[in-house]
Image: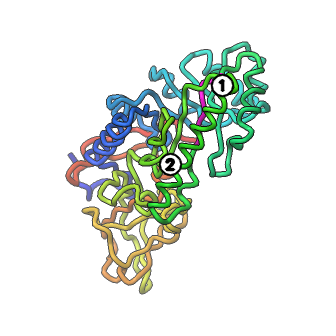
Amino acid sequence: MTPLAEPATPALLVDRTRLERNVADMAASLRGAGVALRPHFKTSKCLEVARRQLDHGAIGFTCSTPAEVRLLQDEGVGDLLWAHQPVGPAKVAFAVEALRRGGLTLGLDSAEVAAPLASSGVTVPFLLEVDTGLGRTGVDPDRAVETATRIVGLPGLELRGVMTHEGHLGRHRDRTALEEAGRRAGLLLASVAADLRAAGLDCPIVSVGSTPGATSAPFAEGVTEARPGTYVYYDSGQVRLGSATLDRCAQTVLTRVVSAQRPGTVIIDAGVKAMSSDGLAGGTLGTVCDVSGRPLEGVVFGDGNEEHGYLTGSGTASLRVGDLLRVVPNHACGTTNMWSRLHVVEDDQVVDHWLVHARR
């Protein structure tokens, strides 16, 4: 075991006790509702975390990138969903190779995306991606039957169900409104599945996917599967949305104060290369805590350069060069992708090191 004061900073930490509680609680919640759990691997990109999810009953994983699919297939995980449109020759070639290995389902939202796969000579199981409000990828619900019919008319394309990412729930600041929006997203997707069945198309899987929506969308009647990801670690963004409290956040970045030259501002050695900079925590890079994990009042991590973070506010007056801090990132998934390994922590001691795989 190694005391937290010893690792070089910045360093990515994961609290094993919190991680294991998060994994167990989500699995139990969905199991109780009779909903299958297919977590998103992009949050951890870590096989040790994935094994814990499988041990708690996950049926497989959701993947974003070819690297994630390849890694999990190499590890023998046999039920994967690649939830990203495989567009372009390189991705089409990879999809065909991975489909031949077996155990892969694709997410598709148009016949245009599906057409290059139809000439491959392989069977292509797919979920039709439906937009339930995010406005990103996904077919509009009122065009789902038409689109699915076009896709299954292509050689080798086999419809397995429908999927959505209810990422628009993050726009809500009121938890009650968020929960209601999640329930509506689940019901809308289930209604699309019913329309497809009425049109004579098989649609056994109805798959929702987000951590903010994990307490609402999967419990809508007709939903069969959930794909949360961030729940394994949670983060400052999820705390802001009411999905978790700060004491459930398993991922932190360990950092030190390296400069205190100006009143009201101190500089730490964790910049944007150590964090996610997507602003999911209300415009900050994360929640600043002392080394024990208690949030520091009057300290805001609002900006950063590559290797430097700017902490501002009245609370910085008590900080000195060399002080050790922990930052709960604004977004766990983006933060993970910045690192090649993590320090596993128990009782403020580093007890293990796990690798982060399949980074871009």
- Image side of residue 113 versus residue 352, left or right: right
Label 1 sits on residue: 95
Residue 44 visible in this rendered orientation of the protein: yes
Secondary structure of the residue carrying numbered label 2:
helix
At a point 68% along the width and 44% down the height, the residue shown is 137
- Residue where numbered disc 2 is placed: 183
Residue type at mark 1: give it: Ala
Type of the residue with mark 2: Arg
Residue numbers of the magenta segment:
159-164
Residue 156 pos. (x, y %): 71, 16
Name the residue at 57% across, 16% down: 101
Q: Position of residue 200 (x, y in %)?
A: 68, 22
Q: Which mark sits nearer the N-terminus, 1 or 2?
A: 1
Task: Looking at the picture, tell me which residue is in the foreground, 25 or 21.
Answer: 25
The numbered mark at residue 163 is none
Q: Residue furthest top?
A: 121
The reply to whether the magenta stretch includes residue 44 is no
